[in-house]
Image: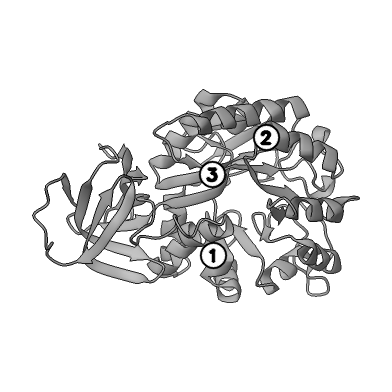
Amino acid sequence: MTAEDWVIQHVRVVSARGIQEDAFIRVTGGIIREVGTGASPYDWACPVIDGQGSWLLPGFIDMHVHGGNGADVMDGSVKSVERIGRFHAAHGTTAWLPTTLTAAEDRLMKALDAVRQASDEARLIPTILGVHLEGPFIAPNRRGAQNPEFIQAPSVAVTESLMHRASGLVRCMTLAPERPGGLDLVRWLGQRQVLISMGHTDASSDLAEAAIEAGVRRATHLFNGMRGLHHREGGPVTAALLDERVVCEVIADGQHVAWDVLKLVVKVKGPDGITLITDAMAAAGQPDGVYDLGGLPVEVKAGRACLAGTEQLAGSTLTMDQAVRNMAAKVGVSLPDVVRMASTTPARQLGLVDCKGDIAAGMDADFVLMDESMSVLATWVQGCEIYRRS
């Protein structure tokens, strides 16, 4: 399938606005030209796909993904970036932010080079919207599975060097704002339209609130890698939950956050304050075993990834379609609200609401077709089919 004229019909379209039964969508040049309901008024002179009543959702936007199918962004290889992209395309992702880890500066530079090269060339993978730098400016005592050898204090000079190497691709940075120089870096990044996320942080409530006032607009994998919520000290969790300016990442796998806690987060933040992420590592889509994550050994047992010899979670093996299924089945979120968390809200945070995160005329033709059990049948990016279940 190319990005020429084509039509998909007899689908149930799910958007943030609701569910449209028995719909058809006309795509021209990778853009949605028309969305209608019922019998088509046209004698289509172009390829027509019969959706046979399947669900059609806006493509998922994963703003925090390290790897998949045995590959990692930190491999510093274009082939690895492609392999990760192809894997997540099979699970409904149509756009993503390849995410780095705390590492030596030369290794970070190599990873940025690979992502930049992959994004510059036309490839049948999800659209690379930019890079998410997770670290190296984090709190050592909240590092999680980040390599302690390469943790640094926040530095404008180091950040500027990384951003220059990435040629404008840095769209998001996770940092611990309480570290010396943290708030200054938040302000500096905000002036350059980089989305700032507090994560791997030991910030107090007061400091977290100050960071939000300085420009933090996101919380990295809420609850994980941050000071926990306590009834005498809410910390970054409470600050993120209570401030409407902050969008919270959640890893909806039942391991990182319990289902009842996710229900509480949804009740407090609503779908416009939550983005579903995978935080997937190389082991996603692979058998149990030992894998590398930022130079640290990670053991995966029954799909649960932990630093070898510990119970410290180390990324995940989650995919976006499974996160969508979990939020619907385990947390009781409606499909339109799940779409907001998986597609619409991340598009809004990235300033892309005019082209992504919705199914409407004028938007990019980024779709995921799902069967009755919400498993992926096909994925399109700007009208081009990049995955079809065999």
Mark 3 or 2, closer to the camera: 3
Q: Dot 2: few (<14), some (14–19), or many (≥20) neighbours within 10 Å?
A: some
Query: Please, is residue 305 above or below residue 104 in the view?
Result: below
Q: Alpha-carbon distance for marks 2 and 1?
A: 26 Å
Q: Which residue is mark 1?
A: 259
Left or right: residue 44 versus residue 100 is: left
Q: Local crowd at mark 1 within 10 Å, few (<14), some, or many (≥20)?
A: some
Of callouts 1 and 3, the N-terminal one: 3
Give the amino acid at mark 1.
Answer: Trp
Q: Residue 308 shows which numbered tag?
A: 2
**What amino acid is labelled 2 in the image?**
Ala
- Identify the element where label 1 is drawn: helix
Vertical placement of 153 versus 374: above or below? above
Residue at 43% in and 62% down: 339
Q: Residue at x 64, y 55 (%)?
A: 221
Q: Give the crowd class for mark 3: few <14, some 14-19, many >=20 residues within 10 Å.
A: some
Give the SS element for disc 3: loop
Of label 2 and label 1, which has the lower sequence position?
A: 1
Where does residue 131 sit, x and y in percent of width and height?
Answer: 61, 41
Three-letter amino acid code at disc 3?
A: Leu
